[in-house]
Image: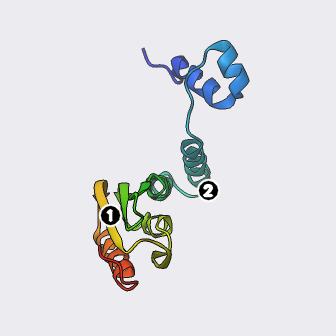
Amino acid sequence: TYYTIEWESAIVVLGSILPQKLRLRFGYETKVKRSDVLIMLIVVVVTLILDLAIAVGVGIAVSCLIFAWDAGTTLTFSRAESSDGQSVVYSVGGPIFFGSIKPLMDLFPDPRTEPKNVTVLFEQAEVHDWSGMMAIKRLHERFENNDATV
């Protein structure tokens, strides 16, 4: 048979509406991300105002922007200085692309105050586009312009 509403999905709706205290009390472990709720609301509003096809396009565009923002904020960074203070090793992980260049550059301290022997490890990093490669080149030049050996 055909149902207009799938009542099993009511648990997901309750999980997205109820406050965390009530979800924990009743054992609702499901939670919808706020960004997904925002996208759904945007698609509904644009559908009501304009057209479903336009609303789907707007939803896809907003989803892409939110994904780029989320992926750009998942960089990991660690710094280890040698015991003699002559060298430093940086480890970078996560996606490197146009949306994560500024956070990547902000992670590194001023090269004038750092040891002159620098090693940057990108073992856990994934470079996704040309701007990511250019950011790594810019980082290399930033250290070399301050007389550091990279």
Q: Amino acid at mark 1?
A: Val
Kindly check if marks 2 and 1 are in contact, taking CB atoms under 8 A apart as contact. no
Residue appearing at x 55%, y 18% in the figure: 7
- The quadrant holding residue 125 is bottom left
Tag 1 secondary structure: strand
Q: From the image, tell me which residue sits under label 2.
A: 49
Query: With respect to residue 132, does 124 lie above or below?
Result: above
Considering depth in this image, is 135 or 51 the residue closer to the camera? Answer: 135
Q: Is residue 29 left or right of residue 129?
A: right
Looking at the rendered structure, the number of numbered marks drawn on it comes to: 2
Residue appearing at x 51%, y 21% in the figure: 6
* Picture disc at residue 72: none
User: Residue 30 in the image: x percent, y percent?
Assistant: 55, 25
Considering depth in this image, is 132 or 38 the residue closer to the camera? Answer: 132
Q: Is residue 71 left or right of residue 45?
A: left
Q: From the image, tell me which residue sits under label 1.
A: 120
Tag 2 secondary structure: helix
Residue appearing at x 61%, y 14% in the figure: 27
Q: Residues within 10 Å of mark 2 (few under 14, many from 20)?
A: few
Considering depth in this image, is 144 or 31 the residue closer to the camera? Answer: 144
